[in-house]
Image (spheres, rainbow, N blue to C red):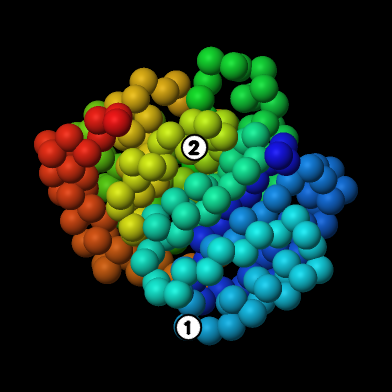
Amino acid sequence: MPLLSISIPCYNEEKRLPEKIAPYLDWLEKNLPDYEFVLVNDGSKDGTLRVMEDLASGNKKIKVVNLPENHGRGFGMKTGVLASSGQFVLETDADLPVHPYQIPIFLEYLKNHPDVSFVIGSREHPRSGFVLKQTWFRIFAGKVFHQLFIWFFGSQFRDVMCGFKMFRHDVAQDIFKYVYDEKFLAAGEIIYVANKFGYKVVELPVVWEDDRRSQVRIVRDTFRTLKGMWELWARNLKGKYHKN
């Protein structure tokens, strides 16, 4: 059981993944070698699976999970987290927007605060910073969504959609069984489920580097996210978030 699992869902990342993951792995080997990488190929149409398998052939700490069909970031995230075996599980994005030097900060916080179930990175935290900010339109769309999420679901957090969250293993296994959204709202659904189950969650600052090659499409994914919010509300009425 490694100390840390890092779960990353990937879709059509043949070009970006090698350049992003190589320095990440180098840093981990030097500073935090007790890790595993869980790379989920979410039905990519390019050579992403081949790239993943090449990486895994040279590093036994890399686990590849292949999904034949594309589902979406939420499904890939859930698949990777549930396949993780580390004492702590970090889920993040394929563009690796947060430098790995921040991983030990999150780990130490969880080790020193046993009452905290998981921690989430927040780009809206007063102590957060940016190497490269998102475009103004993405920032605006994110703020509108977040305000809607607060109105509908009562979140007390500044940035539920940030793709940098670290869980205790048992907490991750418990929460992700109840994550149903297959697209982008899954990041917010995690927080909703945590609140329903009474888990204590803390926001921590991050230094964020945006990648302008992101596959997020604002108009399309905004509609998908609004649809996901409606479906989350409907699932709650149906009792889907009651523990078995």
Q: Amino acid at mark 2?
A: Ala
* Residue 13 position in % (x across, y down): 56, 74
* Quarter placement of the N terminus: top right
* Numbered mark located on residue 66 in the image: none
**124 vs 2, nearest the viewer:** 2
Look at the image and tell me whether residue 152 can be seen.
no
* Whole-number angstrom distance, CA of label 1 to CA of label 2: 29 Å
Look at the image and tell me whether residue 118 can be seen.
yes
* Quarter placement of the C terminus: top left
**As drawn, is 221 to the left or to the right of 223?**
right
**As drawn, is 178 to the left or to the right of 22?**
left
* Numbered mark located on residue 45 in the image: 1
**59 vs 104, nearest the viewer:** 59
Determine whether the residue tagged by mark 2 lies in a helix, strand or loop: helix
**92 vs 126, nearest the viewer:** 92
**As drawn, is 69 to the left or to the right of 13?**
left
Residue 34, by quadrant, is top right
Q: Amino acid at mark 1?
A: Lys
Residue at the image point whose x is 53% and y is 15% from the top = 115
**As drawn, is 94 to the left or to the right of 141?**
right
* Residue 146 position in % (x across, y down): 30, 42
Residue assigned mark 2: 172
- Position above or below: 140 against 239: below
**107 vs 96, nearest the viewer:** 107
Residue 150, by quadrant, is top left
Of labels 1 and 2, earlier in sequence is 1
Determine whether the residue tagged by mark 1 lies in a helix, strand or loop: loop
